[in-house]
Image: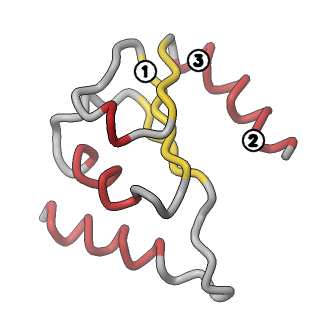
Amino acid sequence: MTDRLLLNAQNDLHSKPDGNLSSTCTAVGTCGVVEPAASFIAHVGGRAEAIYVGAEEPANSDSFTECRLGKAGEVLPDLLGQNCAS
């Protein structure tokens, strides 16, 4: 099941009609150990900015471009407002 979810996610990353990939991938509240979320961010690496939002640093923090620590309800509005404005 996990492999199929990752494959579907990878296919989605490559299926944009203009050939460009998403510019940002945001993971919220994952510990970086539980699959498939733990592996998914590694597959995104280099193809999109990878941002983590959560209360504690995830085990796979080195896979992220940026880690924003705090409560998602407090961090996300600022993050999404920033990304939507650009």
Q: Is residue 39 left or right of residue 83?
A: left
Asked whether disc 1 touches disc 2, contact meaning CB atoms under 8 Å apart, the reply is: no
Relative height, residue 28 to residue 73 (above, below): below
Q: Position of residue 86 (x, y in %)?
A: 84, 46
Asked whether disc 1 touches disc 3, contact meaning CB atoms under 8 Å apart, the reply is: no
Quadrant containing the N terminus in the rendered view: bottom left
User: Relative to the observer, which residue lies in front, 63 or 27?
Assistant: 63
Point 44% across, 32% down: residue: 28
- Residue with the mark numbered 2: 83
Point 58% across, 71% down: residue: 21
Query: In the rendered structure, which amino acid carries the disc numbered 2?
Result: Asn
Q: Which of the numbered marks, if any, corresponds to residue 54?
A: 1
Disc 1 crowd, CA 10 A, few/some/many (<14, 14-19, 20+): many
User: Relative to the observer, which residue lies in front, 41 or 29?
Assistant: 41
Q: Secondary structure at mark 2?
A: helix
Asked whether disc 3 touches disc 2, contact meaning CB atoms under 8 Å apart, the reply is: no
- Residue with the mark numbered 3: 73
Q: Secondary structure at mark 1?
A: strand
**Alpha carbon of mark 1 to alpha carbon of mark 3: how far?**
10 Å
